[in-house]
Image: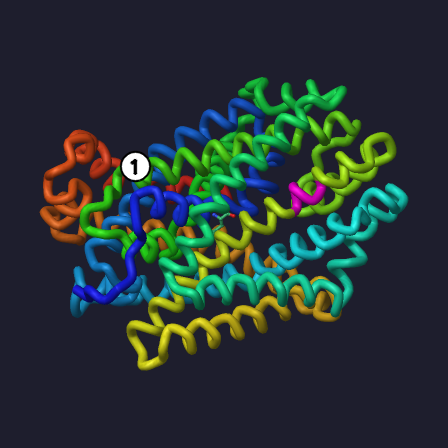
Amino acid sequence: MNDNRETFGSNFAVIMAMAGSAIGLGNIWRFPYIVGQYGGAAFIIVYVLASIFLALPILYAESIIGRASRSNTFKAMRTFAPRTGWHWVGILTIVTPILIMGFYGVVGGWSVQYLIKSLSFNFIHTSPDSVTNYFNTYITSDLAPLWGHFLFVASMVVIVLAGVKNGIERFTKPTLPLLMVLIIGIAVYSMCLPGSGAGIDYLIKPDFSKLTAQGVGAALGQSFFSLSLGVGTILIYASYMKKGQNIALSGLGTTLFDVMFAIIAGFAIMPAVFAAGLEPGAGPGLIFETLPFIFNKMGQTLPILSGVVSIVFFFSIFIAALTSAISLLEVGVAYLSEETRLSRRTSTIILGLFIWALGVVCSLSFGSLKEITIGGENIFGFLDNVCSNILMPFGGLLFTIFVGWKMPKPKVYEEFTNGGTKKFNRAIYPAVRFLMRYVAPIGIILIWLSIYL
Ligand code: PHE
């Protein structure tokens, strides 16, 4: 084992880093609108169950491989299955995060732009129409989105350059609790708006008739994407855990944080949408068109308050996206700096440049490159689709099969229970093992069936 490797300082630091990876754009814009689409509370119930019984076991599988090997994804797989094809899974999980960063970074860049516009109270001082139309003009222009994108990618690189403890831990430990406080603040504000009741109903009234098989698949897929599974980010963070730190606890903490954040984000957004008399639109439009419109509308009567809420809101999105981005970059950096002769610094810069260039192409795919389509989608949409619907679940499937069926059983037990010393971990181990071996793989297959049937 490599003992010079950096480690996280405490269980709390591990949870904040993992929750930082988990909490992201998936929680803030994807979750609220699919909740409504598939029956409000009915969907939330399935989503919570899926997070605990499908996603958490996979998170545990990644944590076990990571902490047991204390190395990058490639070497981790080779350690426990030498001379087999398993290290290809390691390679897959180095490529996927970089591809994800291609499109994720573009949306991160939009959040930077919207934060800057909020800071100058821009959404309050222009006409409502121009606020809504701005989004389309902005993302379809070639140069404008590239500034925000550059700043986003540069922030990510700066944090990862500083290292695991001085960069990732130091950044996520204070910002995650802050993020939680901010989103709760926005939720309270949103629920106090006149007319917000319909939005609250939208989230809490279970409508089981809308919960189709596809809805169940969407809930499973959401729990999976939201916990950052299948791409090695959890694995790599767990590889920085100390031997005494607790995998069962950190996994549970991360899952609770992520689920709570998603639900609170729903209450931050939907009541405001209904209070403004709008229908919840799907997709990126929800946070980048509908909400600025709301800030503008409320700004007619309460300009300062609306301006401040819009700053807090876009700041939260920026931070949430950034803490996810650094985990994606770290997977590749760990690999390059440990498996090649490149230093951590050079690895970070090379990958940062690559991610930046890929992001530029994705960003341009709304502008000059929009004619280039693959399967009817622009490059951005294609990457999103391939990563979220195919590569991530595929990686997750392989990780859970690896831990459930391939890794030596005593090793799995030892890692999960800290050599049998943790009573709670010992108690839940048989259930976790069962979930990893049977339930999680079947759950992933159900996700695919719901997407492709
Ligand atoms: N979980 C993140 C989100 O909800 C996205 C992500 C996926 C981050 C995979 C890292 C790895 O936005």
Judged left or right of residue 172, residue 380 is: right
Q: Residue at x 34, y 69 (%)?
A: 335
Q: Does the magenta stretch mainly form a helix, a strand or a loop?
A: helix
> On the image, which quarter does residue 423 sit in?
top left
- Front residue of this view, candidates 112 and 202: 112
- Front residue of this view, candidates 46 and 309: 309
Image coords of residue 331 (percent x, y): 38, 62
Image height of 183 relative to 85, above or below: above
Residue 36 visible at all: no
Q: Residue at x 23, y 59 (%)?
A: 70
Residue carrying label 1: 439
The stretch in magenta equals 310-314
Q: Residue at x 78, y 54 (%)?
A: 136
Judged left or right of residue 220, residue 249 is: left
Q: Residue furthest right?
A: 127
Residue type pointed to by label 1? Val
Residue 432 visible at all: yes
Q: Residues within 10 Å of mark 1 (few under 14, many from 20)?
A: some
Image coords of residue 4 (percent x, y): 23, 67
